[in-house]
Image (tube, helix red, strand yellow):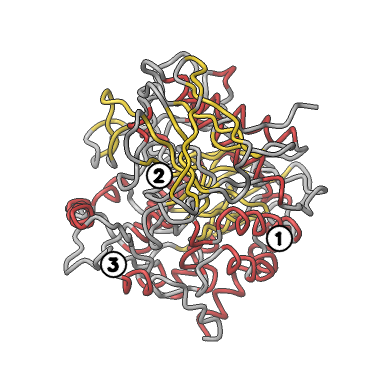
């Protein structure tokens, strides 16, 4: 059996008392740990261990100790590997003892990709409580719905209390307003008790600007590449070994210390690595090993705009070896077919014909010309098993990145909403639902932040205006910084209306069908797509190796 993963960087509570502090700070000549006391603070010098690593044991520290680092006598800085930021991104870090939690999931072995019916949620708006504990209260509902895995939007410490999570700056610290480390552990433990896996959305392509002090410690970022959200992480330049370790350790940390079943990697097309072994291949291998050490199946799923099957092909075939990837082509094709919108990136999709191609071939853009990009895009993926692709008709991106955050339920009729549900749940791929979709939630999901820097808030507003330039979405934009924007985005949980009951019953029936029919297990059937897509009719025949053949007909026309 593999040895369990152990996080060495950061603050580690020792069995015999005291705390070992270990830090990579190659830009510092000296490092101290600053601990507040009743009469001010105490400072402890760390010893240089070579290659920019500093470490020391402080006997008087323990779980709950708050601390900063001082670099060459400079200002206070939080720990880059902080497990908890109880006062936010600018405040002190706090020592956490991961061994203090008593897990009850020893018999949990995880899920396989082909078993997944994923439910994506934002902790802050999923319930009125806006906490991990609030999610726990809804776990029986999700289990009874037929969900097998939760996917949490990023929970790493971000500025303020209102944020999607993609502006996080402390990748190891569950947000204090959500319930911190203990709250997240309790959520995962409770999910496993009702047979639900938990996937965490993590961001390794950039870190948010506010509270981001990593550059003070070392060359975490590079100017050789740029992302749409700021500086790219340094995965292939000088001193990149420790930056790679920073994110790979982080992946293993979530799997080991929080018993998570999988990771969803945000926007891997903005992760740049020209080294011989891509950092994501290394990360996926390490994460699965961390799960195996706990006798659990673990999967790593990418969000990728590349339409490149190498993301999920095995390394011995030239791929990165990830277990799955989001396939937005299915969403875009369905959206165009049902709404008729053709602005922005929707220009590349011609409705039902594109839906048929997505069902048959995985990608719609698999080497063909993209009018939106003004170049050819993608590559064929027909050799990659169906269970490697996650599809959706609504996600946080596709709802929240509309100007006014309209869900599909606000854009199409009830019959069209039902067609979308059927297309998703009788497909041969792994389905993902966005919170509230299963009962036709009509409240929007908007983009919101609570930055402390007014100039940064204005930059966010301007960035949103530029982002929508390619779309014909008229009218004023909701203010991302307004508490009302956040409050409006909370689920209404109006389950008693006739439309909500009808949509909910359909989702429950379809999810039950996926569990009972072998043909609906991704990778378990031969797929044939037919019909007359030019007239809006798409048919799907799934023939399993054993069990009944299933035939579906989707009417995507207006007739």
Mark 2 residue element: loop
Helix, strand or loop at label 3? It is: loop
Taking depth in this image into account, of 410 and 485 the one nearest to the observer is 485
The quadrant in which residue 76 appears is: top left
Whether residue 460 sits left or right of residue 306 in the image: it is left
Residue drawn at x 65%, y 46% as measured from the top left:
97
Quadrant position of the N terminus in the picture: top right
Residue 121 sits above or below residue 482 on the image? above
Nearer to me, 238 or 226: 238
Image location of residue 488, percent across then percent down: 37, 74
Which circle's residue, 3 or 2, is located before the other in the chain?
A: 2
**In this view, 49 is above or below 112:** above
Please indicate whether residue 515 sits to the left or right of residue 208 in the image: right
Which residue has dot 1 on it?
190
Query: Residue under circle 3?
Result: 404
**Mark 3 vs 1: CB contact within 8 A:** no
């Amino acid at each position: 059996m593999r040895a369990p993963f152990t996080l060495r960087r950061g603050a580690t509570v020792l069995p015999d008392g005291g705390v070992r502090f270990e830090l990579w700070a190659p830009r510092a000549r000296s490092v101290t740990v600053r601990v507040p006391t009743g009469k001010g603070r105490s400072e402890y010098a760390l010893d240089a261990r070579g290659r920019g690593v500093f470490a020391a044991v402080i006997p008087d520290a323990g779980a709950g100790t708050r601390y900063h680092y001082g670099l060459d006598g400079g200002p206070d800085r939080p720990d880059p590997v902080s497990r908890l930021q109880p006062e936010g991104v600018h405040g002190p870090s706090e020592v956490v003892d991961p061994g203090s939690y008593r897990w009850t999931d020893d018999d949990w072995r995880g899920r396989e990709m082909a078993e997944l019916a994923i439910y994506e949620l934002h902790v802050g708006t999923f319930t009125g409580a806006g906490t991990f504990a609030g999610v726990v209260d809804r776990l029986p509902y999700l289990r009874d719905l037929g969900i097998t895995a939760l996917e949490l939007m990023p929970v790493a410490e971000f500025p303020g209390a209102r944020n999607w999570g993609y502006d996080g700056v402390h990748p190891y610290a569950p947000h204090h307003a959500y319930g911190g480390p203990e709250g997240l552990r309790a959520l995962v433990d409770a999910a496993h008790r009702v047979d639900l896996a938990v996937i965490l959305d993590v961001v390794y392509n950039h870190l948010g600007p506010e509270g981001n002090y990593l550059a003070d410690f070392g060359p975490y970022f590079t100017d050789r590449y740029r992302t749409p959200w700021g500086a790219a992480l340094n995965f292939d330049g000088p001193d990149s070994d420790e930056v790679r370790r920073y994110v790979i350790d982080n992946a293993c940390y979530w799997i080991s210390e929080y018993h998570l079943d999988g990771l969803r990697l945000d926007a891997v097309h903005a992760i740049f690595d020209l080294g011989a072994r891509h950092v994501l291949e290394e990360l996926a291998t390490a994460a699965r090993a961390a799960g195996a050490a706990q006798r659990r199946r673990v999967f790593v799923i990418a969000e990728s705009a590349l339409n490149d099957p190498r993301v999920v092909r095995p390394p011995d075939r030239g791929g990165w070896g990830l277990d799955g990837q989001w396939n937005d082509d299915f969403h875009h094709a369905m959206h165009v077919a049902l709404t008729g919108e053709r602005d922005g990136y929707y220009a590349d999709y011609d409705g039902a014909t594109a839906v048929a191609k997505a069902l048959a071939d995985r990608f719609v853009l698999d080497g063909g010309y993209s009018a939106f990009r003004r170049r050819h895009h993608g590559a064929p993926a027909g050799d990659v098993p169906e269970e490697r692709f996650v599809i959706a008709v609504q996600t946080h991106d596709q709802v929240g990145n509309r100007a006014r955050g309209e869900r599909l339920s606000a854009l199409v009729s009830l019959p069209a909403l039902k067609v979308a549900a059927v297309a998703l749940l009788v497909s041969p791929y792994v389905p993902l639902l966005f919170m509230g979709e299963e009962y036709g939630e009509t409240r929007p999901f908007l983009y919101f932040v609570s930055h402390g820097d007014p100039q940064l808030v204005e930059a966010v507003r301007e960035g949103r205006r530029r982002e929508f330039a390619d779309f014909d979405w008229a009218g004023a934009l909701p203010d991302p910084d307004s508490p009302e924007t956040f409050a409006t985005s909370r689920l209404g949980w109006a389950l008693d209306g006739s439309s909500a009951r009808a949509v909910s019953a359909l989702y429950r029936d379809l999810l039950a069908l996926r569990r009972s029919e072998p043909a609906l297990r991704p990778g378990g059937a031969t797929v044939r797509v037919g019909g007359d897509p030019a007239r809006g009719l798409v048919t799907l025949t799934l023939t399993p190796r054993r069990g009944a053949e299933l035939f579906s007909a989707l009417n995507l026309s207006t007739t």
